[in-house]
Image (cartoon, rainbow, N blue to C red):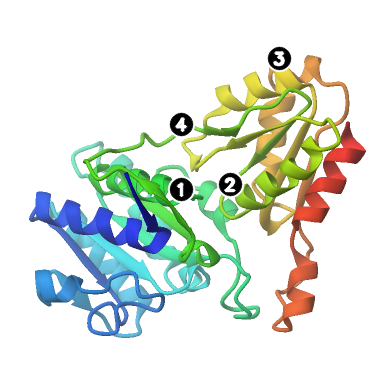
Amino acid sequence: MSEITYAQAIKDAMTEEMRRDEDVFMMGEDIGLYCGAFGVSKGMIQEFGDDRIMETPIAEQGYVGAAVGAAMAGMRPIVELMFSDFMCVCFDELVNEAAKLRFMFGGKVKVPMVMRTAAGAGTGAAAQHSQSLEACLAHFPGMKVVIPSTPYDAKGLLKTAIRDDNPVMFLEQKTLYRTKGEVPEDDYTIPLGKADIKREGTDCTIVTYGRMVQMSLQAAEKLEKEGIEVEIVDIRSLVPLDTESIIESVKKTKHVLIVHEAVKFGGFGGEICGQIADSEAFYYLDAPIRRLGAKSTPIPFNPKLEAETFPTVDKIYNAVRDLV
């Protein structure tokens, strides 16, 4: 094991997969000498050259469409979209082409592409560079959606995504890039659709993902001092979703709080809520299902206002106390 950053784990996953498979290549804006907006691809153009680390114009529709075509032709593109907000520019290529083509061609065509992008807030990047749009993507059949919370998960899930024969949206919460964690030096993968119990507990389940995992763990430590044991289920991938792990945890604790950074109204927490309500876990509940998400507002530039928009450690702590 070695302790590395979330960003390094992502770079290592891409580098190892490009060494393993010559069909894997990377494309995006400023990913070469500039190393990407968050420095993730540092040193990769020196190793692989500009034919496999391809700089693109500021034209998301064009290069995402090119990646779809390359994937159909047998390549395995990794596309870096600078900010997840920019998927709105190339939404047609993602959800009407990449997500649907394998089905429309009766399985004769595969679309093995990964769209990596920096998602979420916490950096003062304001309303057009800070959104969490994962619920939009999860709505479209044919698209897999992954959001890792640790360096270990980031590397293992990205390697799996690159090897997958379907389009995978790989969302990287930008405040996590500099966080550190232990990562094996040997090759490993993590299956998509398998949640991870980040903390065992008996009194309340928190179902969450992305940077909210870290906040939930901090809240759980505070609650432990009051005798409240919280179990934290990190779903890691929205599609496919590990409903079984969520249900088993809720049956055990009989209380559940769903936490995500995205806007609460219309957010993915509603789907998790529905999955629980439609299952046998509903009959084990001792209190209503609770959700905690961002307020329904564009994300402010002002850091104090921005912090007020999203769940925090204290908000998670108070929500669990009210629930149990």
Residue 110 image-quadrant placement: top left
**Are there few (<14), some (14-19), or many (20+) residues within 10 Å of tag 1?**
many
Question: Which badge, 3 or 4, comes first in the chain's sequence?
Answer: 4
Residue bearing the label numbered 3: 280
**Are there few (<14), some (14-19), or many (20+) residues within 10 Å of tag 3?**
some
Residue bearing the label numbered 1: 145
Q: Secondary structure at mark 2?
A: loop
Counting from the top left corner in percent of width and height, residue 304 is at 78, 77
Residue type at mark 3: give it: Glu
Q: Is residue 284 left or right of residue 47?
A: right
Question: Which badge, 2 or 3, comes first in the chain's sequence?
Answer: 2
Closer to the eye: label 3 or 4: 4
**Are there few (<14), some (14-19), or many (20+) residues within 10 Å of tag 2?**
many
Residue type at mark 1: give it: Val
Q: Which label belongs to residue 277?
A: none
| Residue 68 seen in this snapshot | no
Which residue is nearer to you in this view: 140 or 28?
28
